[in-house]
Image (cartoon, rainbow, N blue to C red):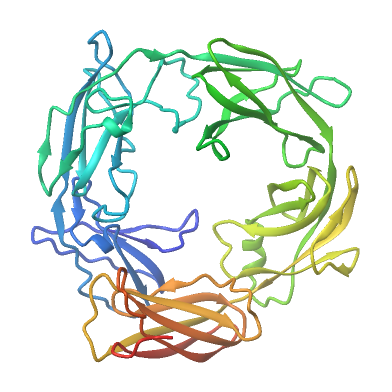
């Protein structure tokens, strides 16, 4: 069994326990907070579909919680062998398991095939599969791209059990609780030819730009007017002459670009190209000087001595939007003294955001430039060097801790108690909704002092009736948790 924070930070511990011969477990010394409790039994699945990944649990100081039970059933198993066109085993190749119909799938759809691959005999065995209907495949297709491996391995065209390259012609594999379906053998066709793309990264004067990383995206055409992209880093970098090379790419449409570090003043645009039946050479990624931004992140008004140390472990993102610019952003760690610097920005309006494991409770209260508050972001021009920026941050440590009680009705196991919170006078809706746990307990932390409208919705997925709803006003104070009890009449439909 494992218990971890529902919003885990990088170094947050996971509390563990092992069940005894009767299946009982006990996890001790768990601090106050919101947690996720889950069983760790790879060959089994939780029988209750709506809690298939575990249960949310709110724990308060000194509380002893019992009855957090899990009904496990053995998951299904699929085994088979993968061979190539010559009948030879295909070794160390990832096996993909795809739900046939996500809308009718019995339970949430998760990537159940990560970590499953063929062995040295070409044999695979996938286990812990939730009951349902699936397609099994190997390889990359026209609508999938797993990135550049850099291993020089041949790429296979996506093939579905038993030997179909058209997903519509795949044979469906039905999985029931505890069953093993074997001989799901796949015969692959010829490997997809792999080609290389090469070129140079240069600045405005044509001089080489060295040691910048190269990113690549596959352009996947959905229809004549729409496309999507998938990809990321390639591991390639430009050398001292600005030259780069990416290998082992299957035919298709791509977009390639370079990524200078966040503090660099250079900016580049993507270059589109298409691989047909030969290598692509001579691509030119042009870099130009962009605007730069520098300033300080300042913590204001907090009496919590640990808040400043936590703020220094966050990162800051600057994003710019403008005419003809769909959005450009760069992210960097905040320096120990609170300073930051970004470069390579196009003209437009810049706004900032914070991120990181320890973000809870922090919020940007205002943005200043040379002491003047910028209500709608900072306007920047091409090649402008903007200094004197102050990102003023507030730290909020109020909380609401509550219990939802249900009256006059039977509550199904699939039901959700959704908690919505709005600060009086603030209609931005920037407080993320949360769920009560199976006991009706909830905890919302990182709140500013003030009055809030607390709304609880008793929602049953798939129900055609308006969900019962109730609301009340709650006052939050700094450094304290306000306790509330909310009662919902299940016979009264909401608005």
Most foreground residue, 212 or 60? 212
The percent position of residue 401, horizontal first and vertical second, equals 44, 82
Which residue sits furthest front? 224
Which residue is found at the position 79% from the left and 59% from the top?
Answer: 296
Most foreground residue, 216 or 164? 164
Q: What is the quadrant of residue 30 in the picture?
A: bottom left
Which residue is found at the position 47% from the left and 31% from the top?
Answer: 145
Instruction: State whether residue 118 appears in this view.
Output: yes
Left or right of 181 in this view: 399: right
Quarter holding the N terminus is bottom left
The percent position of residue 310, horizontal first and vertical second, equals 62, 62
Left or right of 77 in this view: 289: right
Which residue is found at the position 62% from the left and 76% from the top?
Answer: 396
Above or below, comparing residue 125 to residue 482 in the picture: above
Quarter holding the C terminus is bottom left
Above or below, comparing residue 375 to residue 241 in the picture: below
Instruction: State whether residue 334 appears in this view.
Output: no
Left or right of 122 in this view: 317: right
The percent position of residue 306, horizontal first and vertical second, equals 62, 68
The percent position of residue 134, horizontal first and vertical second, equals 24, 41
Above or below, comparing residue 58 to residue 382 in the picture: below
Which residue is found at the position 44% from the left and 72% from the top?
Answer: 434
Q: How many marks?
A: 0
Q: What is the quadrant of residue 298 in the picture?
A: bottom right
Which residue sits furthest top? 86
């Amino acid at each position: 069994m494992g218990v971890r924070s529902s919003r885990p930070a990088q170094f947050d511990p996971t509390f563990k326990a092992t069940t005894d011969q009767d299946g009982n477990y006990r996890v001790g010394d768990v601090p106050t907070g919101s947690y996720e409790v889950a069983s760790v039994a790879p060959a089994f699945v939780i029988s209750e579909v709506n809690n298939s990944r575990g249960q949310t649990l709110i724990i308060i100081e000194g509380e002893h919680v019992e009855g957090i039970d899990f009904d496990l059933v053995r998951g299904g198993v699929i085994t088979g062998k993968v061979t190539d066109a010559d009948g030879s085993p295909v070794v160390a190749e990832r096996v993909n398991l795809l739900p046939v119909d996500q809308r009718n799938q019995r339970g949430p759809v998760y990537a159940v095939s990560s970590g499953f691959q063929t062995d040295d005999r070409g044999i695979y065995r996938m286990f812990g599969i939730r009951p349902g209907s699936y397609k099994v495949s190997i390889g990359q297709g026209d609508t999938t791209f797993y990135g550049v491996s850099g291993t020089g391995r041949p790429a296979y065209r996506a093939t579905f059990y038993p030997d179909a390259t058209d997903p519509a012609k795949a044979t469906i594999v039905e999985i029931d609780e505890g069953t093993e379906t074997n001989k799901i053998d796949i015969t692959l066709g010829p490997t997809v030819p792999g080609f290389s793309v090469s070129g140079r990264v240069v600045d405005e004067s044509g001089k080489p730009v060295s040691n910048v990383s190269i990113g690549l995206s596959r352009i996947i055409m959905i229809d004549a007017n729409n496309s999507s992209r998938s990809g990321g880093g390639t591991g390639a970098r430009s050398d001292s002459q600005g030259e780069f090379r990416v290998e082992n790419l299957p035919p298709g449409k791509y977009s390639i670009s370079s990524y200078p570090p966040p503090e660099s003043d250079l900016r580049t645009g993507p270059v589109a190209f298409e691989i047909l039946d030969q290598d692509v050479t001579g691509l030119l990624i042009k870099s130009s000087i962009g605007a730069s931004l520098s300033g300080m992140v300042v913590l204001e008004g907090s009496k919590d001595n640990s808040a400043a140390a936590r703020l220094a472990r966050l990162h800051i993102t600057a994003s710019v939007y403008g005419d003809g610019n769909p959005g450009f952003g760069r992210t960097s760690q905040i320096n120990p003294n609170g300073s930051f610097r970004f470069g390579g920005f196009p003209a437009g309006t810049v706004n900032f955001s914070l991120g990181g494991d320890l973000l809870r409770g922090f919020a940007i209260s205002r943005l200043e430039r040379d002491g003047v508050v910028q209500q709608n972001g900072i306007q920047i021009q091409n090649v402008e060097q903007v200094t004197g920026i102050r990102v003023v941050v507030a730290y909020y440590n109020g909380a609401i801790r509550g219990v939802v009680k249900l009256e006059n009705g039977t509550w199904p196991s699939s039901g959700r108690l959704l908690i919505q919170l709005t600060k009086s006078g603030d209609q931005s809706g920037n407080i993320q909704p949360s769920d009560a746990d199976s006991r009706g307990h909830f905890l919302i932390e990182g709140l500013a002092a003030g009055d809030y409208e607390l709304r609880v919705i008793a929602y049953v997925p798939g129900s055609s009736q308006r969900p019962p709803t109730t609301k009340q006003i709650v006052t939050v104070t700094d450094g304290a948790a306000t306790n509330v009890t909310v009662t919902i009449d299940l016979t009264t439909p909401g608005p």
